[in-house]
Image: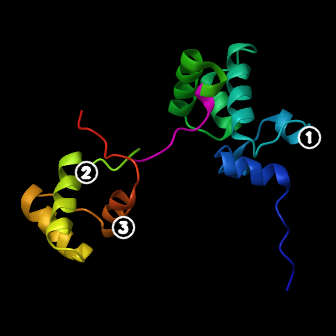
Amino acid sequence: MAKRKKPDQKTLELKRTGTLNPRPESVADTLFKENPFFDPKDLLQVRYEMLRRHSVEGISIVDVAANFGVSRPTVYQAQAAFRQAGLSGLLPKQRGPKEGHKLSVEVIEHVRALRVAEPGLPTVTCIKAVQEKFGITVHRRSLERALASKKKPRHPV
C-alpha cells in the first residue's frame, strides 16, 4: 500500500482558518496553473484574483466564473462582500445558527427549576417537560451544554 502524503503546513493552516478552497482542481486560471505564487487551495487568494481579473483586466463575469470554477452568483456575491468589507468580506462566513436559538432564558430557567425541585432528574425527562411546556424539540447535548455553561443564559431579543 502506498503511504498517504502528509498535508503541508499551509494546507493545514488554511483548513484551520476555514480558507481552504474545497475545489482547487476547478481553478483553471493561467496564473494559478503556471505561477507557484498563486495557490488554488487558498480560497482568499482565489476570490481576490477573481475580482481583480474582472475589475482591473475587464474579463467578463462569465469568463471569470468559468476560469475560477465558481458560479456567476458567487462572483457577484464576492464583489458585493468586497465592496462592503474589503478583504475580510471575502472570508467565508460561519454557517448555521450562531447560538442555541431554541434555548431561551425562560427554557433554561424552567429546566433548572425542575432540577432544583427534583435533583438527579434525567435529561430525557427534562427534554420531555420542555417539549410539553414550550412545544419545542431540544437535542439532549444542546440542553446539557446550556446547563453546564458558566455564562448566564442569553436574553431574548
Q: Which residue is mark 3?
A: 141
Q: Is residue 56 above or below residue 67?
A: above
Q: Position of residue 34 (x, y in %)?
A: 91, 39
Q: Amino acid at mark 1?
A: Pro
Work out which quarter of the rendered image holds the C terminus and state it: top left
Which quadrant would residue 119 be assigned to in this image?
A: bottom left
Left or right of 58: which side holds 131?
left
Residue at figure coordinates x 68%, y 14% from the top left: 55
The crowd level at tag 3 (other Cα within 10 Å; few <14, some 14-19, many 20+) is few
The CA span between labels 3 and 1 is: 45 Å
Work out which quarter of the rendered image holds the N terminus and state it: bottom right
Task: Look at the numbered discs 2 and 3 and tell me whether their residues touch, using CB distance below 8 Å.
Answer: no
Check disc 3 and report its element: helix, strand or loop.
helix
The CA span between labels 2 and 3 is: 13 Å
Task: Look at the numbered discs 3 and 1 and tell me whether their residues touch, using CB distance below 8 Å.
Answer: no
Magenta stretch: helix, strand or loop mostly: loop
Q: Amino acid at mark 2?
A: Lys
Residue at figure coordinates x 19%, y 66% from the top left: 116
Residue at figure coordinates x 24%, y 77% from the top left: 120
Looking at the rendered structure, which numbered label has been put on residue 36?
A: 1
The CA span between labels 1 and 2 is: 48 Å
Q: Position of residue 124 (x, y in %)?
A: 23, 75
Q: Which residue is mark 2?
A: 102
Residue range of the region highlighted in magenta in the rendering: 89-96
* Residue nearer the viewer, 31 or 117: 117
Which quadrant would residue 147 be assigned to in this image?
A: bottom left
N-term mark: 1 or 2: 1
Residue at figure coordinates x 29%, y 47% from the top left: 101
N-term mark: 2 or 3: 2
N-term mark: 3 or 1: 1
Q: Of all residues shown, which one is farthest toward the left?
A: 133
